Amino acid sequence: MKKPILVCDDEEGIRESLKLILEKEYDVVFAATGDEAIEKMRKSPIDLAILDIKMPRRNGLETLRELKKANPSCKVIIATGYRSVEAAEEAAKLGATDYIIKPFDRDKIINLVHKYYNPEFL
């Protein structure tokens, strides 16, 4: 059985890119909003999430806070198109385990996911 990964990004193109990169090895669960991600995490706790930081209504930091309440052991990779030390620090304080800048490097995404799901891979 494939391990699940929650991908939350308001941009469909980003979700599609991550699907192409990850779907062969993982069960990729998608959310277009923070609220949708939180609902999916509450229904079925997932151990790894890739979360966009800039989203309408509920931003990535607010979503991160709620995801960690729903599943404190969930590893969260924050994804952003903006380089911001403050955002990275705040995400780390809230429990994010990694931070990645868009556009994604395919190998970097795969290595990050393997780092949490297949540590022996590294």
Image (cartoon, rainbow, N blue to C red):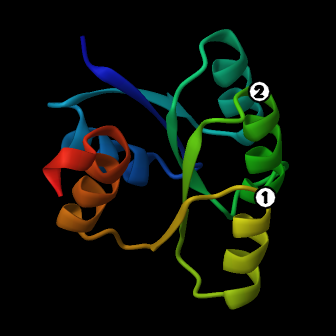
In the rendered image, the vertical position of residue 37 relative to residue 85, given as above or below: above
Q: Which residue is mark 2?
A: 70
Could you say which quadrant of the image residue 103 lies in? Answer: bottom left
Residue 64: % across, % down: 73, 48
State the SS at label 1. loop
Q: Is residue 60 left or right of 21 when viewed as pictured? A: right
Of residues 73 and 113, the one nearer the viewer is 73
> Mark 2: which amino acid?
Ala
Query: Would you identify the image quadrant in which residue 31 lies?
Result: top right
| Residue lying at 41% horizontally and 45% vertically, measured from the top left | 15
From this viewpoint, which residue is outermost toward the front?
120
Q: Residue at x 53, y 76 (%)?
A: 81
Residue 70 at x, y = what percent?
77, 27
What amino acid is labelled 1 in the image? Leu
Residue 12 sits above or below residue 109 on the image? above
The residue that label 1 is drawn on is 94
Q: CA distance from mark 2 to mark 1?
A: 13 Å
Q: For the residue labelled by badge 2, is the local secondary structure a helix, a strand or a loop?
A: helix
Using a 10 Å C-alpha cutoff, classify the residue at mark 1 as few (fewer than 14 neighbours), some (14 to 19) or many (20 or more): some
Q: Quadrant of residue 1?
A: top left
